Image (cartoon, rainbow, N blue to C red):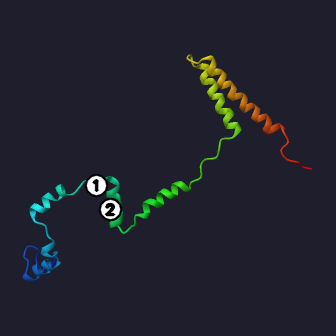
């Protein structure tokens, strides 16, 4: 069985109204209806970044948060350079592309073959010459 409310919500007493009035902001800070409607006309539009910064500041975060995120990206190491084997595999694909393309000129094929020769020479130097004295 439900108990009836002591002060039903549709019947406010004078003390309830006084409590609500105390919680309201001061009358000097309230805008008139015309001021409230015209507020958008007086302010300039904010950019997306300005909106984000304003939201971060209101949430208690400093402007440095956005700067720290950028620094994290800069701290990432660049990818390692491709190995000689990777370069040779890529050149095989490039050679097949130019070989199968009907618009390929002789000069373009010569250039591809020159690069392949450079990679082959580098491989010979890397694997055939002694680089350390052991003994």
Q: Which of 21 and 115 lies nearest the eye of the viewer?
A: 115
Where residue 121 sits in the image (x, y, percent)?
A: 76, 32
Residue 128 visible? The answer is yes
Q: Is residue 113 above or below residue 3?
A: above
User: x%, y% of residue 135?
Assistant: 92, 50
**Image position of 24 (left or right of 133):** left
Residue drawn at the location 47% of the way across and 61% of the way down: 68
Q: Quadrant of residue 7?
A: bottom left
Height in image: 32 above or below 91?
below
- Please give the label number shown on residue 21: none
Q: Secondary structure at mark 1?
A: loop
In the rendered image, residue 91, in percent from the top left (x then y), is placed at 65, 30
Which residue in the protein does label 2 denote? 54
- Marked residue nearer the N-terminal end (1 or 2): 1
Which residue is disc 1 drawn over? 46
Q: Within 10 angstroms of label 1, few (less than 14), some, or many (20 or more) residues?
A: few
Image side of residue 65 versus residue 50, left or right: right
Q: Is residue 64 above or below residue 91?
A: below
Taking the image as drawn, is residue 4 in sight?
no
Q: Secondary structure at mark 2?
A: helix
Q: Are marks 1 and 2 in contact (CB under 8 Å)?
A: yes
Residue 88: x and y in percent read 69, 33
Distance in Å between CA atoms under marks 1 and 2: 10 Å
Q: Residue at x 70, y 37 (%)?
A: 85
Q: Residue at x 35, y 55 (%)?
A: 49
Q: Residue 1 falls in which quadrant of the image?
A: bottom left
- In this view, the residue farthest toward the right is 135
User: Residue at left 79%, top 36%?
Assistant: 125
**98 with respect to 56 (left or right):** right
Q: Is residue 116 left or right of residue 30?
A: right
């Amino acid at each position: 069985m439900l108990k009836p409310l002591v002060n039903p919500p549709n019947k406010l007493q004078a003390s309830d109204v006084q409590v609500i009035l105390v919680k309201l902001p001061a009358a000097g800070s309230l805008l008139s209806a015309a001021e409230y409607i015209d507020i958008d006309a007086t302010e300039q539009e904010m950019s997306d970044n300005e909106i984000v910064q304003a939201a971060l500041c209101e949430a208690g975060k400093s402007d440095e948060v956005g700067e720290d995120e950028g620094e994290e990206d800069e701290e990432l190491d660049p990818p390692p350079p491709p190995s000689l084997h990777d370069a040779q595999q890529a050149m095989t694909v490039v050679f097949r592309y130019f070989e199968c393309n009907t618009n390929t000129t002789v000069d373009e094929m010569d250039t591809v073959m020159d690069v392949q020769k450079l990679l082959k020479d580098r491989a010979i130097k890397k694997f055939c010459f002694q680089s350390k004295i052991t003994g």
